[in-house]
Amino acid sequence: MVFEQIATGGCQSYLIGCPESRAAVLIDPEVRQIDRYLGLAAREGLRIRYVIDTHTHADHFSAAQQLARRLDAPVVTHKLSPAPYADLRLEDGELLIVGDLKLKALHTPGHTRDSICLLADDRVYTGDTLLIGATGRTDLPTGDPEALYDSLFNIVLKLDPKLKVYPAHDYKGRGHSTIADEIADNPRLQKRDRAEFVDMMRHLNLSAPTHLTEALRTNMSGGKTVAQMLAEAAATVPFVSLDELADKVASDRLDLVLLDMRERDAWLAGHIPGARHLPRGQLELRVNDELPDPTARILTCCEFGRISTLAAATLRTLGFRRAAALDGGVKLWRERGFPLTVGDSP
Ligand SMILES: [Fe+2]
């Protein structure tokens, strides 16, 4: 078996391949690691046949949809997954066959309604059902401590004690453990009485994961994160450095249309000398009047350099083939001590 464990912060993804056929599966991919997964698969000579999410993640951004489309492979989830982009919805006990490898899906609700564990060879990929020294939490949408009790004590902990446990999260870099070790040492599994376990899970008082709203929105809808939108825009535009622009301003040879995309208050408080004011919210409304020459060189700027990137990408889409964005924003310009014009004049 070809096996790669890829950590992104505390999130764990797994690339598992058949050494004979070179067919592979990818479990719980995260959106920032797309190039890494593709690079690893290429290095190992693997063709990813299935992209699996063990559950609807509330704390990481799933790359399943993007990767699956790129690889022409199905997104695999449990049948109860709300993700509209899921192609193959497994029922409890069903197998995926990947060359000589077989992965068996076990429905283990509790952390979420659509949680699965995947059993393959000498190991079990437990998603967020069973973690090393912990369990998945049950206080997020569709979580249910009673269901988690059944999934753990009646399914997962009854598996072969020698099985290696590979969870979807580990924040301490421990890699894996075994079912036997978890039964012996996992503090949450010492509450073997149903009522005690449920009571413990109900009173963990965990803080909400960062990006909860955005992760649920994107993972349940297949929509994009704000960071993805920005990365996609940034990939289509060139940038101009602050120093380059400062030189142009200092030597009075601003040979481009510098557009300040911020709101009026920010513009009046201080803008880069020579800039014109065109708020991002009015770009499409005013573009035909303000920018009659599609061959003009345009440089967009804003406070932080993010909205200006989106604006430059929009201008390129509209046919302004020389639109670029400032690398950085007026905030950094100000902090660097470059000159500012206060008031309404350019
Ligand atoms: Fe989770």
Image: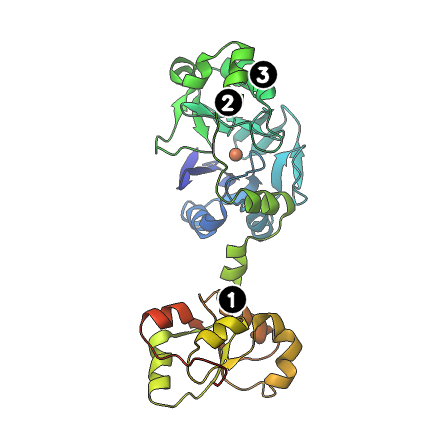
In the shown orientation, is residue 149 left or right of residue 255?
right
The amino acid type of the residue labelled 3 equals: Asp
Q: Depth check: 143 or 81 in front?
A: 143
Q: At numbered mark 3, what does the secondary structure look like: helix, strand or loop?
A: helix
- Residue underneath mark 2: 203
Badge 2: few (under 14), some or many (20 or more) residues near its Cα, within 10 Å?
few
Vertical relation: 241 (above or below) 41: below
| Horizontal and vertical percent position of residue 325 | 47, 73
- Residue underneath mark 3: 150
Q: Depth check: 7 or 285 in front?
A: 285
The residue lying at 52 percent from left, 65 percent from top is 233
In the rendered view, how is the structure colored? rainbow
Pair 3/2: label in front: 2
The amino acid type of the residue labelled 1 equals: Ile
- Residue underneath mark 1: 307
Q: Depth check: 247 or 207 in front?
A: 207
Specify whether residue 35 is in view.
Answer: yes
